Amino acid sequence: MTNTSEERTNNLERAEHYIYLAAGYILVFAAAGLLVAALIEMAGSIMEGKYTTAMVHLLDRVLLALMLAEIIYTVGRISRTQMLETEPFLIVGIIAAIRRILILTAEGSSHIDITDPVFQALLAELGLLALIIFLLAGSMRLLGDRSKSPE
């Protein structure tokens, strides 16, 4: 018995669905492991008396877990609808930029000297990240306007 073109397409779609499902579960386990590891590391840092380091590290890991959660949502949605959407990826980009801004400001708050080249580089990076967030948010706005307008 030979497979028709339609049967082969169905097999490919089913295989694609299982790949998305496996990737989604791997991301779930990675995010859960990341959060558990972050809590353990935070407890260790607090016991050493490094409170600021503990909080910065925890914040970094929680925001990374949020990025993974958004990617998990995106993978699930792609698996269900069979369509790639741009908005979830823009959200991941915004979260990533905000995560970097928070970490940079937390780590760099003790090194404030306007003449220091390291501080100037930090300011430049913060400005670039702010611009990226603005552009990504603007892109989301444009995509939202496009999907609402009648065609």
Image (cartoon, helix red, strand yellow):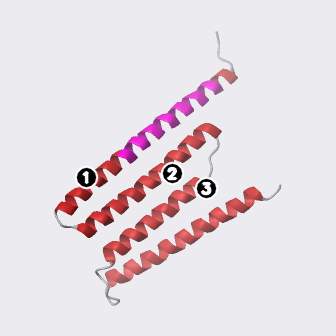
Residue 10 on the magenta segment: yes
Please, what is the dominant secondary structure of the magenta stretch? helix
The structure residue drawn at horizontal position 32% and vertical position 66%, both measured from the top left corner, is: 56
Image coordinates for residue 36, horizontal then vertical, percent? 31, 48
Q: Residues in magenta?
A: 9-32
Numbered disc 2: secondary structure: helix
The structure residue drawn at horizontal position 66% and vertical position 21%, both measured from the top left corner, is: 7
Q: Quadrant of residue 32?
A: top left
Give the numbered dot on residue 5.
none
Q: Which residue type does callout 1 highlight? A: Ile
Earlier in the chain: of badge 1 and badge 3, it is 1
Q: Which residue type does callout 2 highlight? A: Glu
Q: Going by the image, does 8 lie left or right of 124?
A: right
Quick one: 13 or 49, which is closer to the camera?
49
Q: Quadrant of residue 28?
A: top left
- For mark 2, what is the residue? 70
Earlier in the chain: of badge 2 and badge 3, it is 2
Residue 3 on the magenta segment: no
Q: Residues within 10 Å of mark 1 (few under 14, many from 20)?
A: few
- For mark 3, what is the residue? 87
Q: Residues within 10 Å of mark 2 (few under 14, many from 20)?
A: some
The structure residue drawn at horizontal position 32% and vertical position 80%, both measured from the top left corner, is: 118
Q: Quadrant of residue 108?
A: bottom left
Position of the C terminus, as image quadrant, is: bottom right
* 2 or 3: mark nearer the eye: 2
- For mark 1, what is the residue? 40
Numbered disc 3: secondary structure: helix
